[in-house]
Amino acid sequence: MYRITTALLFSLHLLAPAAAVAGAANDPGQKCDGSTVQIIECLKALTAESDKRLNKAFETAIKASTPMQVEKLREAERLWISFRDADCHFFGLGEGTVAGVAAAQCLLNLTEARTRELEGIGNQ
């Protein structure tokens, strides 16, 4: 049962990301192909680009928030970072070299999702 559950979670976590790898960082032509190491490095680079966008969206969301909301948004961001890191670390502990790809993909997916969420706050 454990292997089935882990495999199912792993599969679900990787299904949505396939589109993210193909169109990450707002570049529909960007793909991460090659060896496992090359894919991981590519995903890390895409995550770094997404992280820049995330930071900009966070600053915009802070400016768009009321003074009472600012501290809660900062708190939520700190908690989100802890969640993201723990969640993706879980995938990195899987078996085989694909675990590194899964962890890197997780970081990219969650960073892009949080960025879209924060951009929504800043655009209200």
Image (spheres, rainbow, N blue to C red):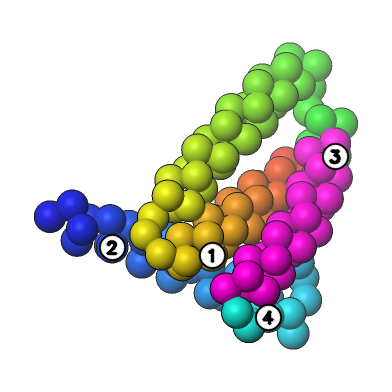
Q: Is residue 123 visible?
A: no
Residue 63 to residue 1: above or below: above
In the rendered structure, which amino acid carries the disc numbered 4?
Lys
Question: Gap in Å between the C-alphas at discs 2 and 1?
Answer: 15 Å
Front: mark 3 or 4 = 4
Q: Are marks 1 and 4 in contact (CB under 8 Å)?
A: no
> Residue tagged by mark 2?
7
Report crowding for label 1: few under 14, some 14 to 19, many 20 or more residues within 10 A (C-alpha): many
Q: Closer to the N terminus: mark 1 or mark 3? A: 3
Q: Nearer the viewer, mark 1 or mark 4?
A: 1
Q: Which residue is mark 4?
A: 31
Q: Of all residues shown, which one is farthest toward the left?
A: 1
Residue range of the region highlighted in magenta in the rendering:
36-59
Instruction: Classify mark 1: helix, strand or loop.
Output: helix
**Magenta stretch mostly in which secondary structure?**
helix
> Alpha carbon of mark 2 to alpha carbon of mark 4: how far?
24 Å
Q: Is residue 45 above or below residue 123?
A: below
Q: Residue at x 60, y 79 (%)?
A: 35
Q: Earlier in the sequence, mark 3 or mark 4?
A: 4
